Amino acid sequence: MEADIKPFDNPVKVELGPIGSHRMVKSTKEAAECLLTDWPLNRGPRHGEALDACLKVLDGHRSTSDARDAFIEAAKESEILAPDQDLH
């Protein structure tokens, strides 16, 4: 796995698309792409914060766990975090 994608310690499962369809987001790069291209329209302030965190991690200015935590908060805010998501 390439280091520049900044892999998460544990993937984050979100519900995108039809109800019941899940996506496992496994890295900071994938999280940023998801936030930019696949995110639902109900975007709140956490969406921007998560995107900012992901971009800073990809630039080497923050830790991968910061991006993962921000992504989880944005997913909660948009109500797309999978209900059985393991947050550890």
Image (cartoon, rainbow, N blue to C red):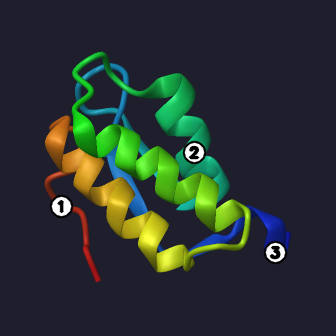
Residue 88 percent location from the top left of the image: 29, 83
Disc nearest the viewer among 1 and 3 = 3
Q: Amino acid type of disc 3?
A: Ala
Report the number of discs.
3
Rendered residue at 85%/69% (across/down): 2
Tell me if I can see residue 50 in this picture: yes
Give residue 84's mark. Answer: 1
Quote the CA–CA distance across marks 2 and 3. Answer: 15 Å
For marks 2 and 3 on the same chain, the one whose residue lies earlier in the sequence: 3
Rendered residue at 48%/36% (across/down): 35
User: In the picture, which quadrant includes the N terminus?
Assistant: bottom right
Left or right? Give the position of 87 relative to 79. Answer: right
CB within 8 Å, label 2 to label 3: no
As helix, strand or loop, the secondary structure at mark 1 comes to loop
Residue 62 percent location from the top left of the image: 57, 75
* Location of mark 2 (residue): 32
Quote the CA–CA distance across marks 1 and 3. Answer: 28 Å
Image quadrant where residue 58 sits? bottom right
Left or right? Give the position of 12 relative to 35. Answer: left
Tell me if I can see residue 11 in this picture: no
Residue 39 percent location from the top left of the image: 40, 27
Disc nearest the viewer among 2 and 1 = 2
Left or right? Give the position of 57 relative to 80. Answer: right
Rendered residue at 27%/45% (across/down): 46
* Location of mark 3 (residue): 3
CB within 8 Å, label 2 to label 1: no
As helix, strand or loop, the secondary structure at mark 3 comes to helix
Rendered residue at 55%/79% (across/down): 63
Give residue 68's mark. Answer: none
Residue positioned most to the right: 2
Closest to the observer, 37 or 81: 37
Q: Amino acid type of disc 2?
A: Ala
